[in-house]
Image (cartoon, rainbow, N blue to C red):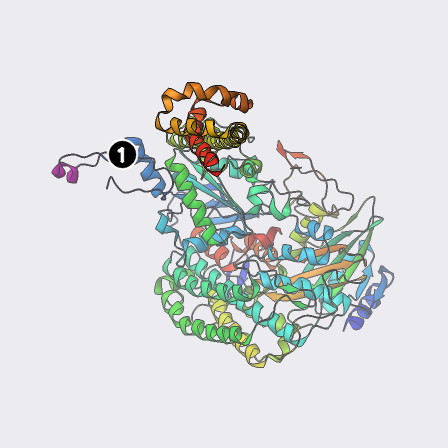
């Protein structure tokens, strides 16, 4: 049981790591955080308010019926009274005449409570935005919304997706969007723009607010690590290119020197291979003159370059 | 003939019989707008004395979505989707009404195949609408299971319409001058088969719900709406036919080639119940399903080849100056569209006669003397769609 | 059918019928505002109209027009009868039909609510669709959309 990952693969599981105990004990005792257990219970038995406003209500009913069967997600208990419900699916157009009633129904629901804005009308006025004098341009002007579900009307599959996303939000304790404090009164919080900006409750770790939350922090750290690794790799490539240039320039300088005194220089190059550390000091003087900019390179890069240079010198000497 | 609270009923009505020795008091309470039995956002203020309804006052407008203003401000083609959202259970019938009214002003002759496709789609829409409403009425009366069975066939019908129109609930299928997409022979065969399937399930529905003893006791002779009340309150559709008047616009004022089909208009009373009671209205709808299935199958058998839209009616089409009032038979009653055009690209005025608007207006008169539970039967059997009441 | 019915009206009411149009897609008889109750009564008694199907108010900027559509259900009339009334734009008032035709009750309330035409003697003369404290009549052509309503922003 403790291994059962109730969130999707790839999403951070808000649950404690499994602990090993005496096998007999493990079969009889379930160990978990109490708050995780509460959240799991809440999200697995959402009780929606049976609250149909308009066309979307028919699709909401379709979702509850045989073909789509919302009870697979534990949300089939449509309550007629707001006192027993914890999810309000606002299915249909909210008008100015209806808005106070919607607010009142929301206030009558007991905490914790969530709102799904189903359909284009409740998301932002929908087709009635421009000439609909009596239509509230989005139910988030009246009650805070957790899940925005567009469509006119949304298909039942879309409502199921909304329920699944709400379950993810519930398992994250509902802290991530809109505050959700019990004393909420004003209509300002939550807007269509929040969704447009990527403040989607399904991927809360993308937002700045999520940084304060325990689970997604690890992901943020991983991202930081990745960035650091990328920067390091880029620096390495730049350094290697510099070394190549230095090597070429050094080779040219060597070739010029060899043209002046070919027979004397060649044996010294062979000696550096056999006993590099002794001869290095003697060799560095002509090198530094030839390099110029190469002197500014990092110490490590110089060490690598020095290991390669003798070979190049030997080849040059052989050819000449 | 029975008289309850000054209203005369044909046939036998069930008068509330309560023991008189119980002390009761008058009380006023609200039903709705959030109530599972009001089919949407209808609010009914009920004045009761104990269990008996003394008076009741329906308050509407909670879903007023300004459709008439919007239709004035959009072009003809742009306005079409908004009528879908009036009666969202019978969306195609609404499109048909608006299209016919504008076409009547312009005098556009629609290709025969398009007329047949309109008929097929509208009747399929009527079938799934009535399935929903019959199931919903059962739900109001406390029978949950039949709703599930009816929804099984409803979903099949939805997916069938979906294959041609692309929509599940609101279709935007009928356009001025025809329809948007043609249906191929394969689909027509599937639709023919679907009609057989639904017809084979009618006995199942009847055994589960219609002739269920509890349901019969609950609805027979309950919540009477008589002929005279229907006429006075402009009530139309299945309610009017269940009250014993043979009135069906598909027969009386045929439109879109309905005169080509041979069908009977069922008129109450039926096997049980009396003229104008809740059970008769429910049975009326189930008979109309069978009748619609017949029409669909006849239309599929007779459908001619040819264009599915008028070639000269384009997206920017507009009606010439003039006006016309066209009423069609929607699942809920006579749906009227009165268009006044001044020749510009937008209609000057579009007035909708939503049948539910008139059908619910009788609630105040017919509910007097009913028990509170029977008030639910009255609302459930009048089968209103609030989108159409408020528009 | 129309011609006959409107002829009957003209015979019965005389000057009160200002105009009769029998051609086109919408034949109608134009009635003087104060005679509309009588005209409807004549239609019911002599022409078989037994259902008031629809009441429409229209704002024509310089005048208002109210159109009444009647249906003959029991007679099986093959089309709707149409009566029209023209009203001045300054003070659109006409007598109500709600006492004789109960269906006119809601139709006329809706017309008052959305178009702003008053019906004298109406038993429930108040708004039906919009809230009671709503300002203006939306289907008038010069209607200005509200910017806020009870603290809710209506513009965005």
Q: Is residue A319 magenta?
A: no
Image quarter for residue B156? bottom left
Is disc 1 placed on a helix, strand or loop? loop
The residue singled out by tag 1 in the image is A17
Q: Which residues are magenta?
A: A21-33
Left/right placement of residue B339 relative to residue B40 reads: right
Left/right placement of residue B122 relative to residue B280 reads: right
When the figure is inspected, residue A284 is found, relative to residue A50, above or below; the finding is above
For this rendering, which residue is in front, A235 or A104? A235
For residue A177, say whether it is visible. Answer: no
Residue B366 in picture, x, y percent from top left: 53, 56
Residue A78 in picture, x, y percent from top left: 40, 47
Residue B378 in picture, x, y percent from top left: 49, 57
- Residue at 47% over, 50% down: A158
For this rendering, which residue is in front, A131 or A303? A303
For residue A146, say whether it is visible. Answer: yes
For this rendering, which residue is in front, C40 or A10? A10
Task: Answer few, some or many: residues within 10 Å of disc 1's Cα (few below 14, many 20 plus, some between 14 and 19).
Answer: few
Left/right placement of residue A162 relative to residue B357 reads: left
For this rendering, which residue is in front, C134 or B147? B147
Q: Single out the residue that lies furthest toward the front.
A: A263
Task: Identify the subunit bearing mark 1.
Answer: A
Image quarter for residue C113? top right
Q: Tell how many labels.
A: 1
- Residue at 83% over, 46% down: C89
Residue A196 in picture, x, y percent from top left: 56, 39
């Amino acid at each position: 049981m403790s291994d059962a990952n109730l969130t999707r693969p790839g999403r951070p599981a808000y649950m404690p790591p499994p602990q090993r105990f005496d096998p007999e004990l493990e079969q009889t005792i379930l160990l978990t955080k109490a708050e995780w257990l509460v959240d799991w219970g809440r999200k697995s038995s959402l009780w929606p308010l049976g609250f149909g406003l308009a066309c979307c209500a028919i699709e909401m009913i379709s979702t509850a019926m045989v073909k789509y069967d919302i009870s697979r997600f534990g949300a089939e208990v449509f309550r007629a009274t707001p006192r027993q419900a914890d999810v309000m699916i606002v299915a249909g157009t909210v008008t100015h005449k209806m808005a106070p009633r919607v607010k009142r129904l929301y206030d009558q629901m007991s905490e914790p409570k969530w709102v799904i804005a189903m359909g284009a009308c409740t998301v932002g006025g929908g087709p009635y935005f421009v000439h609909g004098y009596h239509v509230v341009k989005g139910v988030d002007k009246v009650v805070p919304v957790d899940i925005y579900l567009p469509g006119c009307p949304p298909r039942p599959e879309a409502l199921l997706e909304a329920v699944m996303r709400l379950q993810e939000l519930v398992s994250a304790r509902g802290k991530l969007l809109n505050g959700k404090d019990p004393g909420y009164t004003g209509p300002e919080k939550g807007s269509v723009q929040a969704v447009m900006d990527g403040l989607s409750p399904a991927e809360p770790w993308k937002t700045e607010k999520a940084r304060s939350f325990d689970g997604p922090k690890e992901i943020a750290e991983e991202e930081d690590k990745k960035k650091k690794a990328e920067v390091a790799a880029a620096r390495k490539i730049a350094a290697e290119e510099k070394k190549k240039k230095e090597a070429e320039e050094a080779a040219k300088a060597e070739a010029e020197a060899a043209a002046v005194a070919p027979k004397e220089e060649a044996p010294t190059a062979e000696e550096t291979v056999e006993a590099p550390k002794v001869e290095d000091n003697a060799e560095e003087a002509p090198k530094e003159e030839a390099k110029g900019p190469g002197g500014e390179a990092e110490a490590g890069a110089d060490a690598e370059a020095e290991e390669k240079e003798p070979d190049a010198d030997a080849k040059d000497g052989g050819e000449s | 003939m029975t008289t309850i609270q000054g209203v005369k009923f044909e046939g036998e009505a069930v008068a509330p019989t309560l023991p008189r020795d119980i002390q009761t008091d008058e009380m006023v309470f609200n039903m709705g707008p959030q109530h599972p039995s009001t089919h949407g956002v209808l609010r009914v203020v009920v004045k009761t004395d104990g269990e008996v309804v003394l008076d009741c006052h329906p308050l509407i407008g909670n879903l007023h979505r300004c459709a008439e203003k919007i239709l004035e401000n959009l072009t003809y083609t742009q306005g079409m989707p908004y009528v879908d959202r009036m009666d969202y259970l019978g969306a195609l019938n609404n499109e048909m009404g608006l299209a016919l009214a504008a076409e009547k002003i312009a005098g556009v002759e629609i290709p025969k195949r398009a007329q047949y496709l309109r008929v097929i789609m509208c009747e399929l829409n009527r079938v799934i609408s009535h399935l929903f409403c019959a199931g919903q009425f059962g739900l109001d009366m406390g029978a949950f299971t039949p709703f599930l069975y009816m929804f099984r066939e409803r979903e099949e019908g939805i997916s069938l319409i979906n294959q041609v129109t692309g929509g599940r609930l609101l279709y935007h299928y009928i356009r001025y001058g025809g329809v948007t997409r043609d249906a191929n022979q394969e689909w027509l065969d599937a639709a023919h088969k679907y009609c057989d399937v639904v017809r084979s399930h009618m006995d199942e529905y009847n055994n589960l719900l219609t002739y269920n003893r509890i349901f019969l006791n609950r609805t027979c002779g309950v919540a009477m709406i008589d002929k005279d009340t229907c006429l006075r309150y402009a009530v139309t559709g299945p309610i009017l036919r269940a009250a014993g008047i043979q009135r069906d616009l598909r027969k009386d004022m045929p439109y879109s080639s309905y005169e080509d089909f041979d069908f009977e208009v069922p008129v109450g009373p039926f096997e049980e119940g009396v003229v104008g009671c809740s059970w008769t209205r429910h049975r009326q709808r189930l008979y109309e399903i069978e009748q619609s299935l017949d029409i669909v199958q006849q239309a599929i058998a007779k459908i001619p080849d040819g264009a599915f839209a008028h070639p000269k009616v384009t997206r920017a089409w507009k009606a010439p100056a003039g006006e016309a009032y066209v009423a069609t038979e929607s699942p809920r009653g006579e749906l009227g569209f009165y268009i006044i055009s001044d020749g510009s690209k937008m209609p000057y005025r579009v007035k909708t006669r939503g049948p539910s608007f008139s059908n619910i207006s009788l609630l105040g008169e017919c509910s007097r003397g009913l028990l509170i539970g029977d008030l639910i039967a009255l609302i459930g059997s009048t089968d209103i769609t609030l989108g159409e009441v408020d528009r | 059918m129309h011609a006959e019915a409107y002829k009957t009206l003209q015979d019965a009411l005389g000057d009160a019928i200002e105009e009769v149009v029998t051609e086109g897609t919408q034949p109608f008889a134009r009635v003087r505002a104060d005679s509309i109750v009588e005209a409807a009564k004549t239609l019911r008694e002599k022409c078989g109209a037994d259902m008031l199907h629809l009441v429409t108010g229209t704002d024509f900027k310089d005048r208002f027009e109210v159109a009444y559509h009647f249906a003959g259900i029991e007679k099986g009339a093959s089309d709707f009868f149409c009566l029209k009334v023209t009203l001045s734009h300054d003070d659109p008032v006409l007598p109500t039909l709600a006492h004789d035709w109960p269906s006119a009750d809601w139709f006329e309330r809706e017309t008052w609510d959305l178009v702003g035409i008053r019906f004298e003697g109406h038993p429930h003369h108040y708004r039906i669709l919009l809230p009671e404290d709503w300002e203006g009549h939306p289907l008038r052509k010069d209607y200005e959309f509200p910017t806020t309503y009870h603290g809710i922003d209506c513009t965005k």
